[in-house]
């Protein structure tokens, strides 16, 4: 079984597409999906471990978790098959080679194409360090990034991310469930934090899915959003009672999207979200990737 290493990326998948959710909807983006998640929405940990150990899922397959089946949750993680195998260890150079092969290397370096770190959960221990080390590797091995700065000039151990961020043109988005504290190095080099907290419909306890320190940390960032998928007005009320009110989250930083997994549900669910947005004054958006590609993954 693969483990997270600071000198490699534990990749489940990576692909070039368009951001389909949140405030960057429509922006050309390269998605880097890292393996392993600290939560198991719709499943008990026992069921999750069984899936991983016995490899019960085909790539792209959607299942109903045991908590979902028992009525203790109303949905199961829809990207489970993408990260459940823990991923494959890849050297840092792998991503750079992929970008060059696809002709998008320069566009990623200059921030035209956003780089989306997702999962799984990209902020769990090990992933944060790996992302930071990947960034250092990229910047120190490309003269377009460093402008001739050598590793000795850089003095990474002492200067850390401050110099990295000062010359970095890449645009990083971190997609997180908001249950892990983001350390300084990754925090400072991230341009946008997309936090998708889980509601009680995940079958998870409040203690598992609401970590005050991690949420408050995200709100310290200059550019963050809290993204919620809603299916009922009760979901909206829970968002207010569990997140917006206790943490004093500004409504301008709250995005709600429709709970759906197929194009057949698109219009009805989107209309519902927009009506809720009018009533509760948050930002209502659709899910662009589903409207365009339905259930197809990694496009």
Image (cartoon, rainbow, N blue to C red):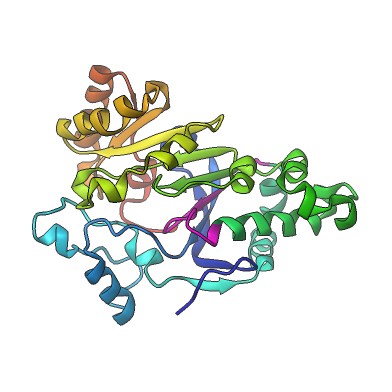
Let me know if residue 57 appears in the view: no
State which quarter of the image contains the N terminus. bottom left
Residue 164 image point, x, y percent:
74, 46
Is 267 situated above or below 81? above
Q: How many marks?
A: 0
Q: Is residue 145 magenta?
A: no
Residue 28 found in image quarter = top right
At horizontal 37% and vertical 29% (from top left) the residue drawn is 254
Res 120 → quadrant? bottom left
Name the chief secondary structure element in magenta. loop
Image: 55 above or below 218: below
Comparing 19 with 279, the one in front is 279
Instruction: Name which residue lies at 23% across and 29% down.
Output: 241
Tell me residue 16's x, y (percent): 54, 54
248 left or right, relative to 148: left
Picture coordinates of residue 246, whole percent (x, y): 31, 28
In what quadrant of the picture does the C terminus appear?
bottom left
283 to the left or right of 88: left
- 291 to 119, vertically: above or below: above
Magenta region, residue range: 111-127
Specify whether 251 is left or right of 154: left
- Residue at the (26%, 76%) spot, across then down: 50
Residue 264 visible, this orientation? yes
Residue 229 screen position, x and y as percent? 28, 40
Q: Is residue 116 magenta?
A: yes
Residue ID at (33%, 35%): 286
């Amino acid at each position: 079984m693969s483990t997270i290493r600071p000198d490699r990326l534990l990749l489940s998948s990576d692909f070039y597409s368009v951001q389909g959710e949140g405030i960057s909807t429509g922006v050309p983006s390269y998605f880097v999906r890292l393996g392993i998640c600290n939560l198991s929405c719709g499943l008990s940990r026992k069921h999750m471990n069984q899936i991983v150990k016995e490899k019960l899922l085909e790539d792209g397959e959607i299942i109903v978790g045991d908590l979902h089946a028992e009525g203790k949750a109303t949905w199961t993680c829809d990207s489970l098959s993408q990260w459940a195998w823990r991923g494959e260890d890849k050297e840092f150079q792998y991503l750079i080679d992929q970008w060059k092969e696809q002709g998008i290397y320069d566009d990623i370096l200059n921030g035209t194409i956003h780089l989306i770190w997702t999962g799984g959960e990209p902020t769990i221990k090990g992933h944060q360090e790996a992302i930071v080390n990947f960034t250092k590797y990229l910047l120190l091995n490309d003269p377009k990034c460093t402008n001739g700065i050598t590793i000795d000039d850089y003095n990474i151990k002492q200067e850390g991310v401050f110099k990295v961020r000062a010359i970095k043109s890449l645009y990083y988005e971190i997609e997180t469930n908001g249950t892990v504290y983001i350390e300084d190095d990754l925090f400072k080099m991230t341009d946008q934090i997309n936090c998708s907290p889980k509601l009680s419909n995940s079958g998870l306890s409040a203690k598992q899915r609401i970590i005050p320190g991690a949420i408050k940390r995200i709100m310290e960032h200059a550019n963050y959003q809290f993204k919620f998928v809603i299916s009922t007005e009760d979901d909206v009320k829970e968002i207010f009672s569990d997140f917006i009110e206790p943490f004093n989250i500004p409504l301008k930083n709250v995005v709600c999207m429709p709970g759906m997994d197929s194009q057949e549900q698109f219009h009805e669910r989107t209309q519902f979200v927009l009506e809720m947005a009018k009533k509760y004054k948050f930002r209502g958006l659709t899910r662009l990737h589903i409207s365009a590609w339905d259930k197809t993954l990694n496009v």
